Image (tube, rainbow, N blue to C red):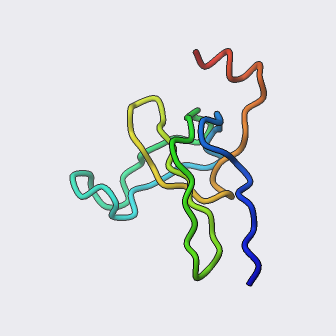
Amino acid sequence: MIPQSPKFQWGQWVSAVENLYNDGSYPEAPADALLVEAGERGEILNVGTHTETNTHIYLVEFKEKIVVGCFEAEISPLNATQQIDSD
């Protein structure tokens, strides 16, 4: 399998394209609790790759200071105007 380049880079601003729920990654939160609402903006802190499946995983910090691992399909890039509006 040829490694694919990540679609997004660290430091890039993105928004959640769907509601993101607790999949067990946050043991202090109830299972299936809403962590991030669709449309919420965040910044990519790190990009990792699951080597067996060549799947990129993005650690994104959203406004509530919560860091969530996201797949490419769960986030969308913000344009320059949207990034300025988020500051």
- Determine the residue located farthest toward the left in the rendered image: 28
Q: Quadrant of residue 53?
A: bottom right
Residue visible at 65% across and 74% down?
54
Q: Quadrant of residue 23?
A: bottom left
From the image, which quarter does the N terminus lie in? bottom right
- Determine the residue located farthest toward the front in the rendered image: 2
| Residue 48 against residue 12 in the figure, above or below | below
Residue visible at 60% across and 42% down?
10
| Residue 43 against residue 74 in the figure, above or below | above
**Is residue 51 found left or right of 78 in the rendered image?**
left
- As rendered, which of 78 and 40 lies closer to the eye? 78
**Is residue 8 found left or right of 68 in the rendered image?**
right
* Residue 4 location (% of width, % of height): 75, 68
From the image, which quarter does the C terminus lie in? top right
* Residue 76 location (% of width, % of height): 71, 44
- As rendered, which of 61 and 48 lies closer to the eye? 48
* Residue 42 location (% of width, % of height): 55, 35
| Residue 57 against residue 59 in the figure, above or below | below
Q: How many marks?
A: 0
* Residue 67 location (% of width, % of height): 42, 44
Residue visible at 55% across and 72% down?
50
Residue visible at 55% across and 55% down?
70
